[in-house]
């Protein structure tokens, strides 16, 4: 306690210097907590939109089809398959299973008036589709497709591109299973506006029974089985388990992360940048700590000599300087956590409207609207402890340099 009292007294001898270095550490902690909260919220929204509107927790299909779909190529009808009862039962037996729906996807040209646009046609089973995806919840006009209905549902951006409304006519032109060109025609039954820009522009929904007949496929043929699980962690684990059970068969299993490579890379680089910025500020803070200890040792040469003359050991003098540095780290860490906590609270309550800054859809990011922050209490604790430890470690060498001064020379201040 005696050494701690000395350290606390010395800590505030040069308040300006102390709070300058503490301010650098405060900024480092604040930026880290803010950026981490932003990244967690950003990835939660983005992956949530992938799962809710494009690819759920687990996707089962032929490897060739899934690869072409991921890379934006023409979707091959030759890669369709008929799911067996054993496969369906195996999927339903997975831990955390919620629902599954069969999907038949193919590429087509959407034609209205004199214009055309390449789209992905998602042929669905209306009875089970809503149990896996949330597109129906974002219907802004009209109604969703039903079995036996030749109508389609389009995204708002596609509707704006062609200036279409519910009741307007459309044409889909595509190659059928025999390689011949064919068309589907009918009315626009509904328009959706989901928080996934690519789905609003490039995807059309149609009843599967109508698509199968036009494509010339056998009844029951599909391109994917889409599976919703209880949560993301269960989805990733069960995707691996299911992949192991299927072995080297004709079908491939992948999780939502494997179908969203851009997001996975963005997540990795985002957190790398966050820790890089933290490291830069902490480096500056560590240099500041070293400078503070060196300057304190130079200013208190006589005091160090007196302490050694009074019987204090070198190790005890080192501890005093280390405790002072730890105090600076504690002040900076505490202030940073306080500011970070306030910022995360405001982000979680009000969010950040990303559309006010730039259009994320240009970068292939599946989200629009606001990003809300996320709490990570462990990060608050870890960064606080880390800043204190860093400050104490940074002070070790200059502390030993100060403690080894000869007491007689120090007292005479030569």
Image: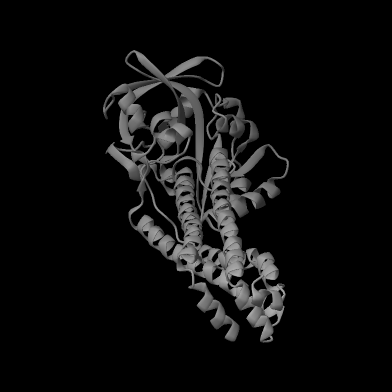
**Where is 224 relative to 180, above or below?**
below
The residue most toward the top is 114
The quadrant of the image that shows the N terminus is bottom right
Check the image and tell me how it is coloured.
one colour
Q: How many marks?
A: 0
Q: Nearer the viewer, residue 38 or 399?
A: 399
Residue 139 image point, x, y percent: 31, 40
Judge left or right: residue 186 versus residue 10: left
Residue 93 image point, x, y percent: 59, 56
Q: Could you tell me which residue is drawn at 39 percent across and 58 percent down?
A: 343
Residue 321 lies in what quarter of the image?
A: bottom right
Q: Nearer the viewer, residue 49 or 28?
A: 28
Residue 16 appearing in the image: yes
**Where is 283 relative to 197, above or below?**
below
Judge left or right: residue 356 versus residue 283: left
Q: Nearer the viewer, residue 314 or 254?
A: 314
Residue 15 image point, x, y percent: 46, 68
The quadrant of the image that shows the C terminus is bottom right
Q: Could you tell me which residue is drawn at 36 percent across and 37 percent down?
A: 146
């Amino acid at each position: 306690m005696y050494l701690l009292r000395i350290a606390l007294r010395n800590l505030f001898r040069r308040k300006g210097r102390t709070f300058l270095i503490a301010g650098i550490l405060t900024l480092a902690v604040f930026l880290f907590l803010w950026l981490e909260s932003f990244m967690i919220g950003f990835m939660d929204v983005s992956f949530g939109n992938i799962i809710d509107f494009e690819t759920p927790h687990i996707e089962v299909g032929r490897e060739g089809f899934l690869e072409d779909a991921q890379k934006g190529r023409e979707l091959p009808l030759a890669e369709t398959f008929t799911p067996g009862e054993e496969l369906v039962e195996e999927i339903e037996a997975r831990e955390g299973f919620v629902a599954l729906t069969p999907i038949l996807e193919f590429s087509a040209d959407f034609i209205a008036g004199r214009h055309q646009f390449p789209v992905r046609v998602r042929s669905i089973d209306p009875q089970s589709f809503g149990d896996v995806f949330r597109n129906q919840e974002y219907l802004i006009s009209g109604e969703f497709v039903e079995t036996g209905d030749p109508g389609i549902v389009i995204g708002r951006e596609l509707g704006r591109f062609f200036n279409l409304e519910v009741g307007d006519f459309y044409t889909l032109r595509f190659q059928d299973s025999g390689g011949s060109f064919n068309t589907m025609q009918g009315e626009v039954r509904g328009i959706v506006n989901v928080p996934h820009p690519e789905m609003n522009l490039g995807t059309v929904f149609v009843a599967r029974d109508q698509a199968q007949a036009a494509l010339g496929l056998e009844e029951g043929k599909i391109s994917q089985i889409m599976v919703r699980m209880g949560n993301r962690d269960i989805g990733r684990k069960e995707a691996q388990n299911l992949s192991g059970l299927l072995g080297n068969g004709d079908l491939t299993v992948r999780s939502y992360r494997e179908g969203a490579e851009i997001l996975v890379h963005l997540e990795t680089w985002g957190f790398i940048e966050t820790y890089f910025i933290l490291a830069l500020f902490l480096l500056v803070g560590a240099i500041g700590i070293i400078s503070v200890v060196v300057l304190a040792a130079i200013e208190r040469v006589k005091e160090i000599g007196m302490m050694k003359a009074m019987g204090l050991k070198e190790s005890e003098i080192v501890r005093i300087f280390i405790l002072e540095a730890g105090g600076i780290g504690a002040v900076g860490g505490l202030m940073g956590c306080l500011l970070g906590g306030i910022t995360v609270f405001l982000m979680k309550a009000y969010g950040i409207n990303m559309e006010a800054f730039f259009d994320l859809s240009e970068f292939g990011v599946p989200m629009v609207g606001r990003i809300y922050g996320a709490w990570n209490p462990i990060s608050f604790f870890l960064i606080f402890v880390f800043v204190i430890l860093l400050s104490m470690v940074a002070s070790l060498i200059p502390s030993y340099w100060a403690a080894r001064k000869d007491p007689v020379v120090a007292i005479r201040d030569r």
